[in-house]
Amino acid sequence: MATKSFFVTKNLPEKFFKNISKKFPMEMWPNSNEEIPRQKLLERVSGKTGLLCTLSDRIDRQLLDAAGPQLKCISTLSVGYDHIDIDECKRRGIVVGNTPDVLTDTVAELTIALLLATIRRLFEANQALRQGKWPAGWGHFFMCGSMIKGSHIGVIGGSGRIGRSVIKRLRSFEPAKISYTSRQEYPEMFREFNAEFYPLDRLLIESDIIIVCCSLNDSTRRLISTEQFKRMKSTSVIINTSRGSCIDQQALYEALKSRKIAAAGLDVYEQEPISMDDPLLSLDNVVLLPHIGSAAKSTREQMIQMALDNLEAGLEDRPLLASV
Ligand code: GLV
């Protein structure tokens, strides 16, 4: 039987590979500054039994064909797996692992940070100070924003791991109300967090702060578009730390520009990295972060370890720690 081997699409610290590389021959994309070009990925995955990838690698039929029928395990260094054709992997008997739990609280913290930065205008205020625009004396309404306390927060996908972690943290800010959407109602969401299950339209109409925490799939792609922005309050703020494609980005731009909604805080985009020509960059009522939700060093290290444990289990025909 041919030796099982694997390919890693990102340049990751060697220390994590000490054990697994003793068991299985490995190859890694060596360039830490440059993403692996598609053609190179198709070449390098050929003949491998395992693949460690990230959310920027598109794992579709073309890639699976290029890899060959011996490919048995794909381990993604992310909790999200919308970049992977899961149905096709299942059809081919390929197991897919991801990294839930280890990043839940990290993303929740970033979501709160982004929310506060957006509603209290932290980046604008920082910029104004640096540009010498701090008004002399006391500008009574200078850089005024809004508060979490007393507001209605609607969390789209609020019953998921990250949604719950966000809601748990938000409660200490004393909002007037928390509502959530989900595929179904979870009675413990009310018992534990006093969070009410709402249909999407009602949540959009009534919320002051809307937080997108749902995963991306066919039912959530462009879930928020022009019609949905029309329903929202003109004072409302939307935060997205899940996937950019849950929001129609052009419609968001128009809603922000025309002040149909007040502001947005984004960590994720339809195209990543966002183009430097994107019109969102011309607006001052949007806070833009470069997809750093899970970017705490300890979390990123735990993600590598978990992805490798998944890969090793897959290569050894054992159940993965977390599979899709
Ligand atoms: C990050 O977005 C992830 O899915 O882990």
Image (tube, rainbow, N blue to C red):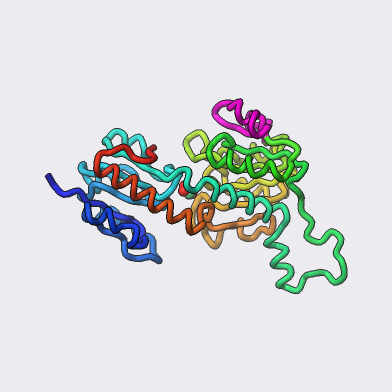
Q: Residue furthest front?
A: 19
On the picture, is 70 further left or further right than 171?
left
Residue occupying image coordinates x 72% and y 45%: 173
Give the quadrant of the N terminus: top left
The answer to whether 178 is drawn above or below residue 122 in the figure is: above
Quadrant of the rendered image containing residue 157: top right
Quadrant of the rendered image containing residue 64: top left
How far from the left and from the top, in percent, is residue 90?
Answer: 31, 34
Foreground pick, 40 / 298 = 298
On the picture, is 262 further left or further right than 218?
right
The answer to whether 28 is drawn above or below residue 59 in the figure is: below
Residue occupying image coordinates x 73% and y 46%: 148
Q: Is residue 186 magenta?
A: yes
How far from the left and from the top, in percent, is residue 112?
Answer: 63, 49
Tell me if I can see residue 40 in this picture.
no
How far from the left and from the top, in percent, is residue 219?
Answer: 51, 33
Q: Is residue 53 magenta?
A: no
Give the quadrant of the C terminus: top left
Q: Residue furthest left?
A: 1
How far from the left and from the top, in percent, is residue 174?
Answer: 74, 42
Count of numbered circles on the image: 0
The answer to whether 135 is drawn above or below residue 229 in the figure is: below
Residue occupying image coordinates x 71% and y 38%: 207
Segment colored magenta? 179-203
Residue occupying image coordinates x 65% and y 55%: 286
Tell me if I can see residue 152 in this picture.
yes
